[in-house]
Image: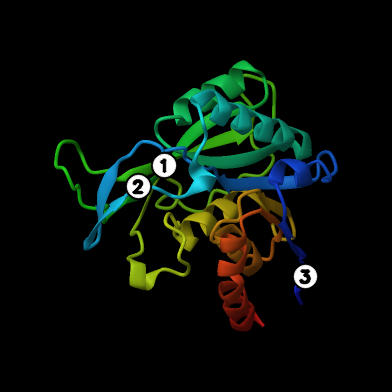
Amino acid sequence: MTTNNKTTHRVIKWDCLEKMQKIPNNYIDFICSDFPYNISNNGWWAKIWDKIRKNDFWDWDKFNTQEEYLDFVFKTCKEYKRILKPNASAVLFFSYIYAGWIWYELQKMWLFCFRQPIIFAKTNPLPKYKKDSFRSCYEIGIWLVNSDREYARSKTFNFINQPTMKNVMVYKIWKEWWKQTNHPTEKPEKLTQNLIEIFTNPWDVVLDSFWWWGTTWIASYKAWRSAISIEKENWFFNMINERQKRAEKLTT
């Protein structure tokens, strides 16, 4: 789709590892992706607002072993390295179980330079059902720069202002009746918008290899950035069509 601000927005329904092979080398200015967390096999339960539910996000979040999951992550990140421009940034969200492990291994393999964690802190975390541990109040993003050096500056880094530029970003999570989509882990649009405006300039190209709830696409569209979004699950792909239409109406 081409908009009246001359940005392009491509939505691709396919497996991300296959489709990213079609993207030219050094083409992408920024990647913002929320990986599967691989926690749906844990059998955990939570009180989600007024109902007790199993933390099962369906098959897209299930891998047979940790090794299989990490192999998928590292294969994806190798494609990221190829398609990102030199010293371009990526912010990737993982479960706290894996985030530190992954950034350490990526830097150890000389794929990326790890710069900082970016913490999405929730002002209204879900209640704890069993009351045997702390409530989960945050999610972890890892900021990576496409360089094999131990320290590298990001190709683009727009320092917005002192209050915004904290690596702990605090937002309220949506209750079910406020959400834009039915995705179980939808993140605030303002969080993604801030990251896009920090790491890109107008008309740069943003990639989200896990389209999920469409927030990266929406934030890119509103900020005059081009976007490539990839999603293979029919349920997610169909779910955000209405959200996409609403965004287009509001910005035309």
Query: Between marks 1 and 3, how big is the CA–CA gap?
Result: 35 Å
Of the residues shown, which amino acid type is indicated by label 3? Met
* Of callouts 2 and 3, the N-terminal one: 3
Q: What is the image's colouring?
A: rainbow
CB of mark 2 within 8 Å of CB of mark 1?
yes
Q: Residue at x 45, y 29 (%)?
A: 98
CB of mark 1 within 8 Å of CB of mark 3?
no
* Of callouts 2 and 1, the N-terminal one: 1
Taking depth in this image into account, of 99 and 163 the one nearest to the observer is: 99
Secondary structure state at the residue bearing disc 3:
loop
Query: Between marks 2 and 3, how big is the CA–CA gap?
Result: 36 Å
| Label 1 sits on residue | 40
Residue 214 seen in the current view: no
The N terminus - image quarter = bottom right
Q: Is residue 27 left or right of residue 147?
A: right
- The mark closer to the camera, 1 or 3, is 1
Q: Residue at x 47, y 31 (%)?
A: 99
Q: Residue at x 70, y 37 (%)?
A: 80
Q: Residues within 10 Å of mark 2 (few under 14, many from 20)?
A: some
Give residue 221's position: percent from left, percent from top.
65, 67
The C terminus - image quarter = bottom right
Of the residues shown, which amino acid type is indicated by label 2? Asn
Q: Is residue 9 left or right of residue 124?
A: right
Query: Between marks 2 and 1, how big is the CA–CA gap?
Result: 6 Å
Secondary structure state at the residue bearing disc 1:
loop
| Label 2 sits on residue | 55
* Of callouts 1 and 3, the N-terminal one: 3
Q: Residues within 10 Å of mark 3 (few under 14, many from 20)?
A: few
Exactly how many numbered labels are in the figure?
A: 3
The label on residue 1 is 3
- The mark closer to the camera, 2 or 3, is 2
The label on residue 161 is none
